[in-house]
Amino acid sequence: MLRKTSAVKYTAVFALLSVAILCAAPSTSPATQSASAFRDLVRSFIDREMRLSPESATEDGDHRFDDRLSDLSAAGIRTRIEHARRWKARFANWRGALPAADQADREWLAAHLDGELLWFEEVKFYRSDPGLYLPTAAIDSLIKRDFAPPADRMRAVAARERAALANLAQARRNLNPASTSKIAVDIALEQMPGTVEFFRNDVPQAFAAVTDLEARRNFTAANDRLIAAIVDYQHWLEGFRARASGTIRLGPHAFRRMLADDDMVDTPISRLEDLGRAELLRLQGEFQRTAALIDRRHAPREVFKSLAGKHPDAAQLIPAVSAGLSQLREFVIEHRIAAINSDQRPLVRETPPFARATTFASMDTPGPLEKKALQAYFYVTLPDPSWPARRTEQLLEFFSAPAISNTSVHEVYPGHFVQFLDNRGDPDLVRSLYYSGANVEGWAFYCEQMMLDQGLHHGAPQYRLAQLQMALQRVCRYLVAIAMHTGSMTVDQAAEFFHTNAYMTPNNARMEALRGTQDPGYLRYQLGKFMILKLRADVQRRQGAAFDLGKFHDAFLAQGGLPIKLIRRALLGDNAGGEL
């Protein structure tokens, strides 16, 4: 999973772009004038987006608004809706001639803005998501990277903590019991101890060396007030839970619109379900055949359980994950899987406790506009020390040696981290700031199978079995997302579906089911893989003997975060044949 956090000053970037436009040779070509005006429009749009979403600006590397948070008041939400309507119309109604790359950007921005309208205007997620009002990630983005002196970042943290008090108060006005599910409240409450611990321990520790006494007093006062407000919010949520009666279901219309807006996919839901069921059956057959290669005497589930039981303990997990990354990097380079455009390596770190409830591992990369703090983090979820031994063991069973390799392929080489390195050099800000989930998650998921197909681990069935189990997990996500959000599948039914079909432990199966309630788009792993495999087959069919897998991967990655529909057009000249 890519945390965006994987996605500086915009001021400098905008200045350079402006100089480039002003210094360009004059042209009377209507196409040239249109393209120049379009890029100028895009620059203005991005600036406005950053002002409206300071947390995203920080993550993207624009540090002009590090002392602010998004305005979640009724007036602030109206402003966001008006912004999306106005800019969607400007991009959708653009009539000037544009080069192919700009035309793709224009289509993508119009779809992206329609997606903003979906979440703010139709879904109204601010009425149903208790976690939205906690500033944890917004503060974490200020302390995890050294993009400015600690004292300056501490002042920004204090300012955001003061702003968070207003948002926590606004939560009581925005959250609607009829819109909020008990599950959403439970997830927020489960993560609350980690959130409070983060502000009591991690945040002060990040600024322990700051010597400015006045700045420290202001920070300490703001931090203490925020902790008290979060604890008070926790108590309020405990009472609110009794009144919460909303559904976890997004609904068929919103689900279809989500796919059309966020990934430019308009395949009927029934067709998507048919593809998912067929893939589930195919993977289950492969899983059974591969398990038999390891041990014919036991059932496939028992073979996998035996494999999963061989894992590092909690203290050795992060060193074990770190140790395998160099081997993967060398394999990608030696076999020309994809270009790696930097010597930079990610650091393996524990997933922040406040994010532990719904993820096993994730890649956190600096924003594409970050100029100073360029460190990337590969987060791995460790068990909570307070957990009973059985729950701890169930989590650690996710991290057998083959599973660690598969996860590292997905998150680092040649998955999210390599894609991030490629995107950092893209001068087209639309493609580095706005990305389709089916592109990014589809690419990383595609890499898991592709790397083994290309000879990683020399065909060892243990590694293939781990890859197939993860593939079963993703196709289960795909089917659960559809069933949960367009049908009537419950969390308990989803957890049982993961447990039965993806050979997951009860704890890990429930983590996956809970994630589906908050992330209806987690079908994009499988959806994107379907689309990439089809695109690869079509490019190979057209190129014949001249087809080169590494060049195909580089060409795909060079298109940045565009939806795969638009990448298909760039690589093949049109969208024909792209239907799933």
Image (cartoon, helix red, strand yellow):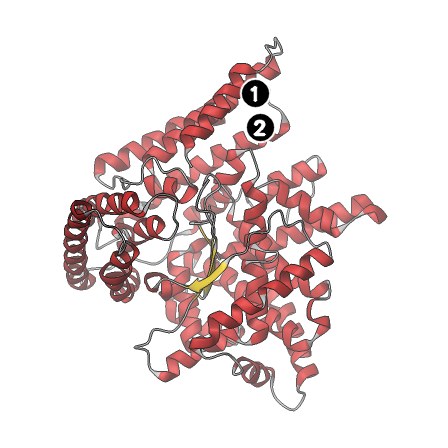
The image shows a total of numbered marks equal to 2
Q: What's the mark number on residue 102?
A: 2
Q: What's the mark number on residue 120?
A: none
- In this view, the residue in front, 119 or 191, is 191
| Residue type of the residue flagged with mark 1 | Ala
Q: Residues within 10 Å of mark 2 (few under 14, many from 20)?
A: some
Query: Marks 2 and 1, how far apart in space?
Result: 7 Å
Quarter assignment of residue 496: bottom left
- Give x and y (percent) for residue 529: 61, 55
Instruction: Locate residue 91 relative to residue 300 in the image: left or right.
Output: left
- Give x and y (percent) for residue 505: 46, 78
Q: Residues within 10 Å of mark 1 (few under 14, many from 20)?
A: some
Q: Examine the rendered structure and indicate whether residue 299 appears above or below residue 469.
A: below
Q: Examine the rendered structure and indicate whether residue 298 appears above or below residue 52.
A: below
- Give x and y (percent) for residue 9: 41, 34
Q: What's the mark number on residue 35?
A: 1
Q: Examine the rendered structure and indicate whether residue 398 appears above or below residue 60.
A: below
The local secondary structure at tag 1 comes to helix
What residue do we see at 52% from left, 40% from top? 432
| Residue type of the residue flagged with mark 2 | Asp
- In this view, the residue in front, 5 or 20, is 20
What residue do we see at 49% from left, 78% from top? 312
The answer to whether marks 2 and 1 mark residues whose Cβ atoms lie closer than 8 Å is yes
The local secondary structure at tag 2 comes to helix
Quarter assignment of residue 8: top left
What residue do we see at 46% from left, 40% from top? 371
Q: Examine the rendered structure and indicate whether residue 465 appears above or below residue 7.
A: below
